[in-house]
Image (spheres, rainbow, N blue to C red):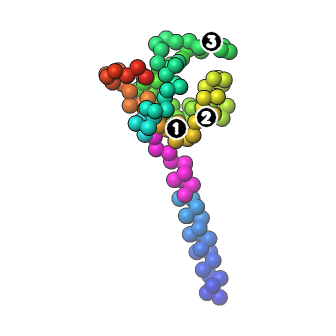
Amino acid sequence: MKKLSILPHLAVAATLAFAGSVAQADEVKGNAAAGNAKVWLCVGCHSIPDYRADYPFVYKVPMLGGQNGPYIASALAAYKKGERKHPTMRSIAASLSDQDMADIGEYYAAQTASTPNNPLK
């Protein structure tokens, strides 16, 4: 009879362990230094002041320096899922992992107007 009373405790323990691992998997912490090596493709459009992309429609391309890191990662994830509509951004985001997106977000969040010698903002 005691063996049966242990089963509910084991089930609760297993559920809590699984929930903890899922929560850890969802938390991706970005690294600005790692992002530095990942923004090479972003620079072609996002480092040009007042740049407008014209395929397939005219889009005003924003400068990303100083933007909130989690916001950038979230925007990239939305492009990857197709929730944001821009064919070039969707194809770029599709090639990025969650860690890549977080790193890129933190890289751009670390950029300020006074960041020296940085053509990538």
Residue 80: x and y in percent read: 63, 33
Q: In the rendered image of this protein, does residue 26 appear above or below residue 106?
A: below
Q: Quadrant of residue 9?
A: bottom right
Vertical position of residue 50 compared to residue 34: above or below: above
Q: Residue furthest bottom?
A: 1
Residue type marked 1 = Asp
Q: On screen, 7 above or below 67?
A: below
- What residue is shown at x 65% (from left), y 88% (from top)? 1
How much space separates mark 1 and mark 2, taking CA atoms?
Answer: 9 Å
* Residue at mark 2: 95
Q: Is residue 88 visible?
A: yes
Query: At which x and y percent is residue 96?
Result: 58, 36
Look at mark 1 in the image and give the residue it sits on: 100
The amino acid type found where label 3 is placed reads Asp
Q: Check disc 2 and report its element: helix, strand or loop.
A: loop
* Label 1 close to label 3 by CB (< 8 Å): no
Asked if residue 111 lies left or right of residue 28, the reply is: left
**Label 1 with label 2: CB-CB less than 8 Å:** no
* Residue at the spot 43% in from the left edge and 23% down from the top edge: 120
Under circle 1, the secondary element is helix
Q: Which residues are magenta?
A: 21-30
